[in-house]
Image (cartoon, helix red, strand yellow):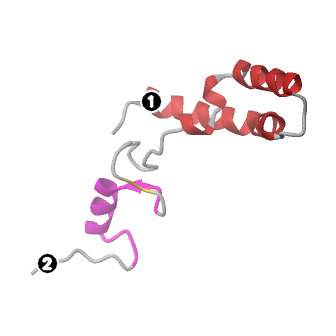
Amino acid sequence: MAKVSAVEKNKRRRKMVDRYAAKRAELKAIVKDQSKPIEERFQAQLKLAALPRNSSKTRIRNRCDVTGRPRAYYRKLKMSRVALRELGNNGLIPGLVKSSW
């Protein structure tokens, strides 16, 4: 199990990303629009930089929903390889069979 504080910090980041997503998209559109005056684009860039760092989507860490493990994460299943193997061995994942020979 991962530290509870690390998992909670990541949850707070996800909420913050959702809260600021529209504002970030709006400011990024202004910054990328070449038809706007450079002063307006620069002001939008400054406003974007003034937003909280944790409101950026790249700050989110993919973590296992079962254990909170940050490494070896399968996006499709939203869990780590360790949790997948454990649940598979216990027969809790339909269609997954432990190979043996």
Magenta residue span = 77-94
Q: Which residue is mark 1?
A: 6
Q: Are marks 1 and 2 in contact (CB under 8 Å)?
A: no
Q: Is residue 99 above or below residue 41?
A: below
* Numbered label attached to residue 83: none
Dot 2 surroundings within 10 Å: few (below 14), some, or many (20 or more)? Answer: few
Where residue 71 sits, quadrant-wise, is top left
Of 94 and 14, nearer the camera is 14
> Which quarter of the picture shows residue 47?
top right
**Which quadrant of the view contains residue 84?**
bottom left
Left or right for 41, reference 67: right
Residue 14: x %, y % from top left: 62, 38
Q: Position of residue 13 (x, y in %)?
A: 60, 32
**Residue type, numbered disc 1:** Ala
Find residue 29 and report its horizontal and vertical position in percent. 81, 40
Secondary-structure class at tag 2: loop
Q: CA distance from mark 1 to mark 2?
A: 36 Å
| Front-lying residue, 51 or 65 | 51
Which residue is at 88% across, 25% downward? 40
**Element on which disc 1 rests:** helix
The quarter of the rendered structure image containing the N terminus is top left
Q: Is residue 77 left or right of residue 71?
A: right
Q: Residue at x 23, y 74 (%)?
A: 98
What residue sits right under mark 2 in the picture?
A: 100
Q: Position of residue 67 (x, y in %)?
A: 38, 45
